[in-house]
Image (tube, rainbow, N blue to C red):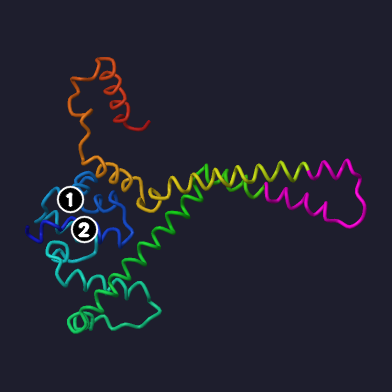
């Protein structure tokens, strides 16, 4: 197979390295997000003006996307240098370095890709912590319960005699709050464990859709033939679609 057939993979790698979303790159290149998605999965060949536009949107040379070779490596090395402005690097020597120490150049490139992926993961997790309502409520429940236990325990630890009735009440409160804390912690752990793969593998709603399409082999049999749908269902779908197409008032 021609090396140019894998241009989509290089486009996706470059886009992810820059931290760009499919929709943003597609808009810059003047194509639809769905078409870019097909290109990135090597389901559409690319060339001509489309290749030039995508290369411009990704701030790289068309040859680095179409042919790969060492141009892709040089781009990665330059990105690594740009990412560390505090370190002085002579970019004019990039090509000479890659030619003389190719293995080291590939190692630097791989490490830069890993650093970028980790930074995006941290950013994604931070965004989830800030906007996921379940995580916010679960963390609030854990922290508030811990504070309640600490407050009650500090009272019980005070020197001097305490009335037996009050002591039993405080002990009961600690016990009940401990159960609350265990339940909230387990619920939070279960949520994070069950959702960890999606958090790490998807960086945006478009990437999430991308994963869903790939998981189903880009084929949904139930959507193939609308004639199998009932007439009321078809009408409801068309009405909903028409409402979405209306301009905002």
- For the C terminus, the quadrant is top left
Q: In this view, does 167 lie to the left or right of 248?
A: right
Badges 1 and 2: C-beta atoms under 8 Å apart? yes
Callout 2: SS: helix
The image quadrant of residue 84 is bottom left
CA neighbours of label 2 inside 10 A, class few (<14), some (14 to 19), many (20+): many
Q: What percent of the width, then of the height, locates residue 213?
A: 25, 42
Q: Does the magenta stretch include residue 178?
A: no
Residue 6 vs 137, above or below: the answer is below
Query: What segment is highlighted magenta in the picture?
Result: 145-171
Q: What percent of the width, then of the height, locates residue 104?
A: 26, 79
Label 1 – label 2 distance at C-alpha: 8 Å
Residue 11 circle label: 2
- Most common SS among magenta residues: helix
Q: Does the magenta stretch include residue 163?
A: yes
Tally of numbered tags: 2
């Amino acid at each position: 197979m021609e090396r140019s057939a894998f241009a989509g993979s290089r486009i996706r790698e470059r886009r992810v390295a820059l931290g760009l979303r499919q929709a943003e790159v597609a808009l810059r290149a003047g194509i639809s997000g769905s078409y870019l998605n097909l290109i990135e999965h090597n389901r559409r060949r690319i060339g001509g003006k489309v290749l030039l536009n995508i290369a411009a949107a990704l701030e790289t040379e068309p040859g680095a996307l179409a042919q790969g070779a060492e141009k892709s490596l040089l781009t990665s090395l330059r990105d690594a240098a740009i990412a560390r402005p505090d370190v002085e690097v002579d970019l004019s020597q990039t090509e000479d370095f890659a030619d003389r120490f190719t293995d080291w150049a590939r190692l630097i490139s791989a490490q830069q890709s890993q650093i970028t992926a980790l930074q995006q993961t941290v950013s994604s997790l931070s965004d989830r912590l800030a906007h996921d309502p379940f995580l916010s409520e679960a963390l609030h429940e854990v922290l508030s319960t811990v504070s309640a236990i600490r407050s009650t325990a500090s009272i019980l630890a005070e020197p001097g005699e305490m009335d037996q009735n009050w002591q039993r009440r405080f002990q009961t409160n600690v016990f009940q709050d401990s159960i609350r804390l265990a339940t909230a912690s387990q619920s939070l752990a279960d949520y994070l464990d069950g959702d960890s793969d999606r958090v790490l593998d998807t960086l945006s709603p478009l990437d999430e859709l991308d994963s869903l399409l790939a998981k189903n082999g880009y084929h949904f049999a139930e959507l193939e033939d609308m004639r199998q749908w009932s007439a009321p269902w078809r009408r409801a779908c068309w009405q909903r679609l028409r409402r979405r197409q209306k301009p905002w008032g």
